[in-house]
Amino acid sequence: MIYYLSIKIIIDKMIFIFIIRDKIDKGCVMCIVAKKTKTSGSPAAIQVALKKATTEMMVLKLLRERPMYTYEMMSTIEERSGGDIVFNTLYLSIYRLEENGYIQKHEKVMSEDNRTRIYFAITESGSAYLDALIQGYRQYARALARVLELEQEKGGDV
């Protein structure tokens, strides 16, 4: 009997697929390398770029409302966006915001299903950073609307 195991690993936009074959006394390891498909040049690219550019702003906005744990933030963003903004994880953004002093661990709570939930809260510097992000975002969005002629009336807001 021959057993096959396939493992897919993505490193620096390259896909490594390892196919491991094992027969009683013989083994075989094969590696297939393929380039990850690019979203650049497709309509999906703008969504990916905007999501990356605004993640910290969304996280900080939610934490300004109240302390939350990571999954709760992801669910709230998905709900408020009507399912248009969905995250598989926020941990990289959370760690970056925490490292820069914009958020901090608020408390650890054990859930009913024995999972530890770490709640995060925004700091004073995080609140100031959020204000600057929002101001920059609004300024950029208004300028972009002018360039694309999206404003419907003179002085209209995006």
Image: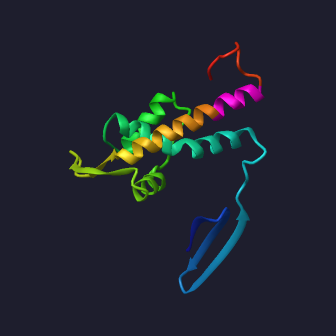
* Colour scheme employed for the rendering of this structure: rainbow
Which x, y percent locates residue 1?
A: 55, 74
Which x, y percent locates residue 122?
A: 35, 44
Give the main secondary structure of the magenta stretch: helix
Where is 22 relative to 35, above or below?
Answer: below
State left or right for residue 92 relative to residue 149: left
* Residue in front for this viewpoint, 39 or 17: 39
- The verdict on residue 7 being magenta is no
Residue range corresponding to the magenta coloring: 140-148
State left or right for residue 93 relative to residue 34: left
**The C terminus, quarter of image:** top right
- Residue placed farthest to the bottom in the image? 25
Residue appearing at x 58%, y 46% in the figure: 52
Q: How many labels does the image show?
A: 0
Which x, y percent locates residue 144?
A: 71, 31
* Residue in front for this viewpoint, 33 or 116: 116
State left or right for residue 28 relative to residue 152: left
- The verdict on residue 145 being magenta is yes
Quadrant of res 157: top right
Where is 148 relative to 113, above or below?
Answer: above
Residue appearing at x 74%, y 26% in the figure: 146
* Residue in front for this viewpoint, 149 or 11: 149
State left or right for residue 138 relative to residue 117: right
Where is 9 relative to 29, above or below?
Answer: above
Which x, y percent locates residue 94?
A: 43, 52
